[in-house]
Image (cartoon, rainbow, N blue to C red):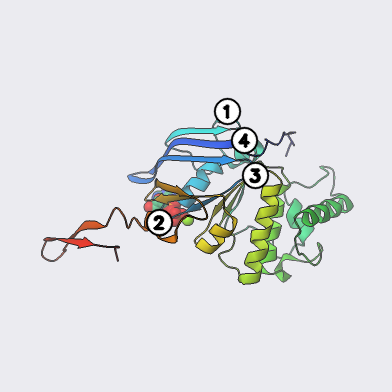
Amino acid sequence: MSRVVKDMPEKGQTILRLSNISKHFGAVSALTDIELEVKAGEVVALVGDNGAGKSTLIKVLAGVHQPSSGTIEFCGQNVTLDSPGKALELGIATVFQDLALCENLDVVANLFLGHELSPWGLDEVAMEVRAWTLLRELAARIPSVREPIASLSGGQRQTVAIARSLLLDPKIIMLDEPTAALGVAQTAEVLNLIERVRERGLGVIIISHNMEDVRAVADRIVVLRLGRNNGVFTPDSSNQDLVAAITGATENAVSRRLDRKTGATHETSGRPA
Ligand SMILES: Nc1ncnc2c1ncn2[C@@H]1O[C@H](COP(=O)(O)OP(=O)(O)O)[C@@H](O)[C@H]1O
Ligand SMILES: [Mg+2]
């Protein structure tokens, strides 16, 4: 892959701005009029219940899905992300939930998979040095870069996947549930790593179900509900407000429930079941 020399935006500068992004799959509206902004050196958490549209939004930004309408501005320019290659080339990297690592290959091989340093043959020494340097910069705890992925913990695998995405010098990195399968210590390690990535001046978008993790690492918390924006929060927003935005509890404070048997409507108050 050709390496484009890219200047890193200043911290606090807007890297990515989505306006009115909608995505339909046939009759299903997965996203409706989504607004999202990500700045350099900022971690934005994307939260919402199952089906809220989080994965669809990530896939639109990764160039996997084309939006049905709306605009995507990247570093001040309107862009079309019509393929995953295009998104990567611009500097939007994605670590999908399955990580896509090769179990039998070592850390170095996984880091450089598909973008080996020398096109005429693998420069093993250079790749190993680059791997060590990057992992050290990220304060990653990997015992050896010659260790096969199969022998690493879940947290270490996540670290390798994140490090791999950084090798292309992205401006934005998107992480889909990076701590979902991890224990306490490994989660802390990955959250630490996300902070290192933020310090490098990247914009980070993290999807997570874990509000504790979200509060620990996010600068802003963007709630999606049923494919729409449903509020922006800070880590010190109350849990009640955040949960209400995620579940729609406030809008359902008084809601009508249709009784399927009788066809009558009941008024219910309080949080929906
Ligand atoms: N490829 C697809 N085809 C049809 N419907 C889809 C597709 N991907 C997602 N959806 C629908 O879009 C909505 C949002 O899904 P998704 O983005 O996966 O939500 P989340 O990741 O927040 O759980 C859901 O109703 C889902 O069924
Ligand atoms: Mg999802």
Q: Is residue 84 left or right of residue 9?
A: left
**Contact (Cβ within 8 Å) of mark 4 with mark 3:** no
What amino acid type should be assigned to the residue bearing mark 4?
A: Gln
Q: Nearer the viewer, residue 7 or 53?
A: 7
Q: Is residue 38 left or right of residue 224?
A: right
Q: Nearer the viewer, residue 26 or 156?
A: 156
Q: Is residue 177 visible?
A: no
The mark lying in front, picked from 4 and 2, is: 2
What amino acid type should be assigned to the residue bearing mark 1?
A: Gln
> Where does label 4 land, which residue?
13
Q: Position of residue 258 (x, y in %)?
A: 17, 60
Relative to 231, residue 151 above or below: below
Sooner in the amino-acid sequence: mark 4 or mark 3: 4
Sooner in the amino-acid sequence: mark 4 or mark 2: 4
> Where does label 2 land, which residue?
241
Quadrant that contains the C terminus:
bottom left
The mark lying in front, picked from 2 and 1, is: 2
Q: Is residue 171 visible?
A: yes
> Where does label 3 land, which residue?
41
- Residue found at x 67% / y 42%: 170
The mark lying in front, picked from 1 and 4, is: 4
Q: Position of residue 46 (x, y in %)?
A: 50, 51
> Where does label 1 land, which residue?
77
